[in-house]
Image (spheres, grey):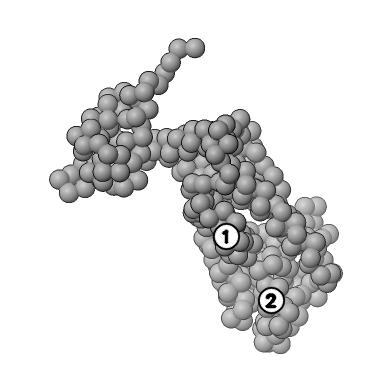
Amino acid sequence: MQRKFDDLLLGSIELFCHAAELGSFTLAANAASVTPAAVSRSVARLEERLGVRLFVRTTRQIRLTDAGRRYFEQCRQALAQLVDAEREVTGEQTTPAGVLRISMPTPYGHYRVLPLLPAFRERYPQVKVETHLSNRNIDFADEGFDLAIRGRAPADSSLVARKLEDAELVVVATPAYLKRAGVPKTIEDLQAHECIQFELPSSGRNLAWSFEGSSEDGDVLTNGGYGTSGDALAGATLARAGAGLFQTYRFVVEDDLREGKLVEVLRDVGNRTRPFILLYPHARFLTSRVRTFVDFLVEQLNTAARQKPAR
């Protein structure tokens, strides 16, 4: 096999990543015990090889170009995999280490994943966890994520999709709102109610509400004077403030329901669920921190599901 990367090129990539992480050729040089000129030459060597500028340089600072940012994220992952591979082979990887980057929707992040992270880091303190909470789809290659949690499996065959759970949906409102506007008994009654809307980031359309037997696919478009986008938890906050009805995941409002701050309605046509799916790129070598976190998350969610009392 013809070599594509010699020792000089691999060293240049390492110095480039140091400079990108630290935002300085001088700091990168200090970290690598070389001169700033050596870092500068390494970056110039990469730019000549790639035919693109990796940094915008001024007298005061350096910053990555768009191409440089994409290249950095890919190189950082590749170098981390090489380190993990060596540790696996030599038996040094007794505990996972490095940076783990996860993207997830806001409701699932706040109520399912973030509460588990302290226990994960207590078990694996050498893993630094970076989370990105958003309802938009991310690009693994361009944005440097290790894992993502989404509501549906993509058509992209390069990703592994592993279902975490089917989360139950509920329609809720405050007792004060229901006293004022009445309690809906049927799906058709929703037309006379203030139904808080959430705009889908992928299409810009309002998310349909889901019920059993309401239509062929169970989805119903509702109306209301409150619209939210970006953060799906905003709808639950509005509902808690008495703005109207909102359909959300039971795990978001289960404390409010238990304490009587919110009331569930239309239970006879409820029981619909939406999936949450863990995604990560196919790889012949999966880093130990990614593999360990996947196993940890699945274990914790399964344990929580077994311990959940019946309603």
**6 up-or-down from 67: above or below:** above
Return the residue found at the far left. 59
Could you say where residue 146 lies in the image, as x and y percent from the top left? 54, 44
Q: Earlier in the sequence, mark 1 or mark 2?
A: 1
Amino acid type of disc 1? Glu
Identify the residue position indicated by label 2 in the image: 255
**247 up-or-down from 35: above or below:** below
Amino acid type of disc 2? Asp
The C terminus: image quadrant = bottom right
Of helix, strand and loop, which one carries label 1?
A: helix
Mark 1–mark 2 distance (CA, rounded to whole Å): 27 Å
**259 up-or-down from 35: above or below:** below
Q: Nearer the viewer, mark 1 or mark 2?
A: 1
Residue 122: numbered disc: 1
Could you say where residue 212 lies in the image, as x and y percent from the top left? 82, 60
Q: Name the image quarter holding residue 44.
A: top left
